[in-house]
Image (cartoon, rainbow, N blue to C red):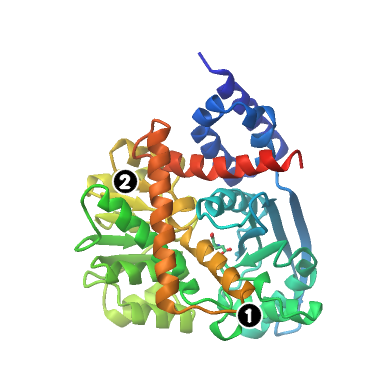
Amino acid sequence: MVSPAVSRLESLYADVLRRNPGEDEFHQAVREVLDSIVPVVERRPEFVEACVVSRVCEPERQIIFRVPWTDDAGRVHINRGFRVEFNSALGPFKGGLRFHPSVYLGTIKFLGFEQIFKNSLTGMPIGGGKGGSDFDPKGRSDAEVMRFCQSFMTELYRHLGEYTDVPAGDIGVGGREIGYLFGQYKRITNRYESGVLTGKGLSWGGSQVRPEATGYGAAFFAQRMLETRGESLDGRRVVVSGSGNVATYAIEKVHQLGGRVVACSDSEGYVVDEAGIDLDLLKQIKEVRRGRVREYAEARGVPFVPGGSVWDVPCDVAMPSATQNELHAGDAATLVANGCRAVVEGANMPTTPEATKALQDCGVLFAPGKAANAGGVATSALEMQQNASRDSWTFEYTEQRLAEIMNQIHDRCAQTAQEYGAPGNYVVGANIAGFVKVADAMLALGLI
Ligand code: GLU
């Protein structure tokens, strides 16, 4: 017998499919949340009756715009820009910008939807949104990236504001891009409005620990989760996928906590370094030279495996930190067979639903991205706090705040899962805890 709550959610999901055709990642993200919140709507039918669930699946505003720019040879290029302002019940829209050729509306909608619940979990006053472009920064000069960012902001600025919508970085958008975007916003508006973007440089309104925060936060989460089983990262073998911002600082914190990261990757393949990834070298190659992990392997004289799956490398803890749907059911089976104890998502939705289920069924601790990688946006909110009070905090103080926030997120997910009859299920705990706070606020604010 299907309960009335379940059938209401099913018809709502059918609506989401019908109204958002072809947006597979968005469907996947919605499906997971709806599956998790069944016991909530059974207890609190007003969430369905007042259409809170259907409203939370519909962005408040979606902006799509043309981004024309010229390359260094004077050729004109046209890209598409997006900003999906998903939910502002808890605060201004907040979420990063992704520049990657694969970006389309469905990518930004899945990321924006996830961001609502992630931001809610941080306990900070921030709503959810996401943006980006199908622009490919790979191989582009600084001048080309600057012209693209200026053109992008020339349209987007009218939708932003420290009380309205506050973007930051994501894949393909780091300190360099935030600088160009902030410069153009400042120029057009004639305002030094620091709180309009986060991830800024330290000398112009940025926060200590923001670059490190997503990766550090994921490692803190992993540590806290392992502690529930009387374990820790100390002495553990860890594999991190990706080699961008999240991966780099996840590796750094895992090493500081006594673990050893033996492999990382990029879209060309993966590198195995049994002595532990040499982070100075990796940063030099990725952040300074904007190079590939193959160059790391060449410099260190360690194996580089082109193509293939980094999850073939045996580990105790896996931290998928590259991109969505990068860890499949077959990878999950390999991880389990190799004795993996925990999977901690540094990226957004990197594990497929089938892989997630396989890991959970085998008793592997599984930390979903919207909880485990929330340290980045949480520290963005700390940056906004510092901007609002025209203050700047020390590295130590900011990192301590981040660690406290991650522990609180962990504990809230664990308690919520327990309370709703799914002990140890962090997916259910994160989705319910994130959802209930937003849903309560939406009810209080009336039908808007
Ligand atoms: N893009 C990051 C995320 O996925 C950070 C967003 C932010 O700092 O606003 O959460």
Q: Quadrant of the C terminus?
A: top right
Question: Total of numbered circles in the picture?
Answer: 2
Rendered residue at 60%/26% (across/down): 45
Q: Amino acid at mark 2?
A: Leu
| 128 or 384: nearer the viewer | 384
- How far across and down, in percent of the image, does residue 394 sit? 45, 79
Image quadrant where residue 188 sits: bottom right
Which residue carries the number 1 mark?
179
| 218 or 394: nearer the viewer | 394
Specify which label sits upstream in the sequence, 2 or 1. 1
Rendered residue at 43%/39% (across/down): 416
Q: Amino acid at mark 1?
A: Gly
Rendered residue at 59%/40% (across/down): 27
Rendered residue at 63%/72% (across/down): 388
| 392 or 200: nearer the viewer | 392
The image shows residue 2, relative to residue 14, as above or below, that is above
Circle 1 sits in a helix, a strand or a loop, which is it? helix
- How far across and down, in percent of the image, does residue 224 sit? 31, 55
Please indicate whether residue 238 sits to the left or right of residue 306 in the image.
Answer: left
- How far across and down, in percent of the image, does residue 250 sit? 37, 66
Which residue carries the number 2 mark?
365
- Report if residue 244 is visible in the image: no
- How far across and down, in percent of the image, does residue 87 sit? 67, 49
Q: Which of the numbered marks, if any, corresponds to residue 7?
A: none
